[in-house]
Amino acid sequence: MSDASDRVTGHPARAGDGRPDPARAPSGAPAPAGRGTVRDRHGPRDAFDYPRHWEADVVLADGGTVHLRPIVPSDSDRLVAFHAKLSERTRYLRYFGAYPRIPPRDLERFSVVDHFDRVAFVALLGDEIVGVGRYERLEGGPSAEVAFVVDDQHQGRGLGSILLEHLAAAASECGLRRFVAEVLAENAAMVRVFRDAGYQVSRALEEGVLHLEFDIDPTEESLAVARAREQAAEARSVHNLLHPRSVAVIGASADPTKVGYVALSNLLSADFAGPVYPVNPEHRSVHGVRAYPSVVDIPDPVELAVVAVPADQVESVLDGALAKGVKTLLIVSAGFAEAGPHGLHAERRLVGEARAHGMRVVGPNALGVLNTDPSVRLNATLAPRLPVRGRAGFFCQSGALGTAILADAEARGLGLSTFVSAGNRADVSGNDLLQYWETDPDTDLVLLYLESFGNPRKFARLARRLGRTKPIVAVKSGRHAVRPQLAATSAEIDEASVQALFEQAGVVRVETLAQLFDTALVFAHQPLPAGPRVGIVGNSSAIGLLAADTARAQGLRLAFDPVDVGPQAGPGEFAAAVREALNSPETDALVAVFVPPLAIPGTAYARALREAVQELDLRKPIVSTFLAAEGVPAELAVSGKDGAPGQGSIPSYPSPERAVSALAKVVRYAAWRHRPQGNVIRPAGVHTERAQQIVREILDEGDKNIMLTDDDAVRLLGCYGVDVVPFRVVSTEDGAVAAAAELGYPVTVKTVDERLRGRPDLAGVRLDLGSEDAVRRGYRDVREVSGDDEVYVQRMAPKGISCFIGLQDDPSFGTLLSFGLSGLVSTLLGDRAYRAVPLTDVDAVTLIREPKSAPLLTGYRGDEPADLAALQDMVLRVNALAEDNPEVRSLTLDPVMASPEGAFVANARIVLGPPPARPDTGPRRLRPIPAD
């Protein structure tokens, strides 16, 4: 969404009136830090030494991009040029005066900062600064003055809100908690920057100047505002790609064997709604269309450039596209990341340059993009035909499979709204398409063929939100290997992680493309079911039983025994049986299985089925095994727009197993969608700042993974209200007795060696010791087994079911929280449930009930049930710990004793280390381009 607020931005300190200005050191403040002034990793830095994760490419409200980074002294000339372009009105509102030029003293203070107490960001478009934001700490405290200003030509693009987000994130890292600003009362646009960001802003007016103050800690409202703006901006960038008003084909060719020939031919054959410009320096026309020597020679604006030249020529093409102001570059050329390290380096450099100059990139090695909207008619792909119009959007990483996917969709009667094959996915990815399809009125169903994840954390967030209104069906290939060209921008994720990600986000996961189309046909043409009760009607008892067996195996319930009208029944009898089954209140969905008799054409039965369903209009989904057809036969189709099968068409499958399996996936999705979504809850008694201070203290010792000591683990868990059953570490028999007396009987004595404690025979543990003599014997026994004088003495927890709660971190996917019952059998059988952090309260409830052994917690065979509410609370506390501290690389609470009295942690193990990736939090940014 656009920010009118950044038309006039910034703290308006009066030039030369002595008023404090973030651009100026306050009275008595030390001069800006120079080289060699780094105090520590959390203090002032060298003017050129800024945190690299503060640098980012960002998408603006109109879909264009800029590069954001901290200011450095070498930016001084750019600052002078930027200031010279500002209008008098903008300068007045920014500085409370004319301020026509930046004096040398001010220029130094503007451009030399310490990236801690004084921070400034520049927004760059190419080599030019188009926006500046800065803050300065006030009197060494937790508050800072904030200011920003945007080039007049780039106001209204959302730069003000982006600068504020990134400044607030940097300030928070540097220990600041509050921003203040002074704004002319007439500067209503500036006030809206702060007000619309979702912060609670206090205002005080004095002599025509508004004094604004607000806490910068993220709030639910500020996060929601940032996410909404991110969605709108990224959706707009994809809209620009799929709705270009003009297209240039760079490398257009008259040679039918060349890619440039195919690309141009397909655009023209689809009758693209706008002008198409062939670019070929050797021909005056191509395909009868006037050609131009280069893209800069085209007299009119170019919004989309299709690049079909050899890889070694793409860089020179990029220069022309940048000069022309092209919005999006679609690179079908191969020879980049898939060709080896040199190609990977070229690909990264290309994307970096494109983003820095305001462009998005699709590819390289892409099949292309298409849009079947009659007002666009865009076929910028290497596939020969524009598909029929439909309401399914398709994203595919593989260019090679793209053509086959489009052909298969057409053969099955599945219409598409849009299609994107992103190839190496160096920039535009599936996440961008999810943002676009969320608000695209022409798309009701999302189909994904994924070989890898670039940003799985963001995928989980977007899919979960989109899936609440539009089904997502995904094939995730590459289980055991990823194509080389995708490896550089992909995360390796184990299958448990992928499954947890998809299930939690409501994504319908399928194993093959055939299953994807099977499932898509139901979503595209049939309503969602109200429940899992399925009726089966047919003219063959054998096929009906096959369908019934498959339904039970898929977790569906039979509304009644399969109805067999017999092989001699006519179309009217068949239709009557269908009507009766659909009218039954016990039926949520119907499977029609049919073998054509010899005497009467099957088409008559198909028409009777379709007409019976249309008459009732009960909003119950129907699938069929009809005429052994695959897709939507003409006799079962309800005509939609543009002649494609529309809503109400009945999909048919070659076998009852495939029909029922597709229906079962739709039933499970409908159940997920109808379940309460839940809320991310912050448990009471959480001390985030204290926990983060503990983490910082421990990691200050180095950048390697560190296993926490017992005391540190207890301290960190205590910040989140997770208490470990009291214990002592002793090294003598008398020490063990004294510890037991202090803790209170009964106690357990156990070795410090995890391997012995975890053995099934409990060789390293002595439980329920109720006297001094028992403790002495226990100490001697454990010492004999371990050979170590040191042992734990711990108060006995109430008896209960031994459980496991864990965190495991994936380098890019993020953190998974797992739950299961402790013990060798559960471990061997993999009886664990997983959820991706952050969890909602509903996730916590379902997580502890998901393992197959979970009935033991609920009073199996008459036992007293465990306190499940206490387990759920502990899960949410561990979730909060993981969300606040991405440095937690792994955590194990094992055992957690779940009893009627509560949940009690007997043992904890935590490993901290540098975060493997930036989490999907903080200010808006595009996926970083990895350094070579």
Image (cartoon, rainbow, N blue to C red):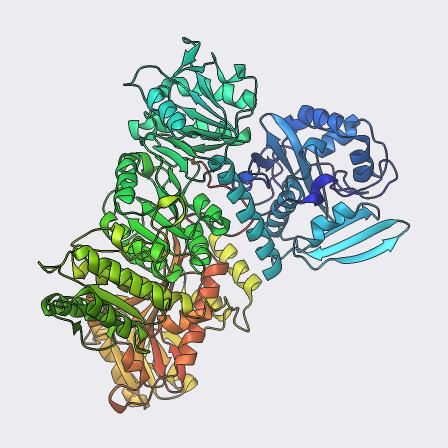
Q: Residue 183: horizontal and vertical position, in percent?
A: 80, 47
Q: Quadrant of residue 346?
A: top left
Residue 726 visible in the picture = no
| Residue 560 pos. (x, y %) | 22, 78
Residue at 27 percent across and 69 percent down: it is: 788
Quadrant for the C terminus in the image = top left
Residue at left 52%, top 63%?
691
What residue appears at the point 42 percent right and 26 percent down from the top-left corner? Answer: 306
Residue toward you, 353 or 385: 385
Image location of residue 559, percent across then percent down: 25, 76
Horizontally, residue 247 falls left or right of residue 849, namely right
**Of 465 and 853, the residue lying toward us:** 465
Q: Nearer the viewer, residue 745 or 75?
A: 75
Image height of 96 relative to 593, above or below: above
Q: Is residue 855 above or below residue 60?
A: below
* Nearest to the observer: residue 788 or residue 161: 161
Q: Is residue 29 left or right of residue 620?
A: right
The answer, for residue 585, to whether it is visible in the render is yes
Q: Report the number of numbered marks.
A: 0
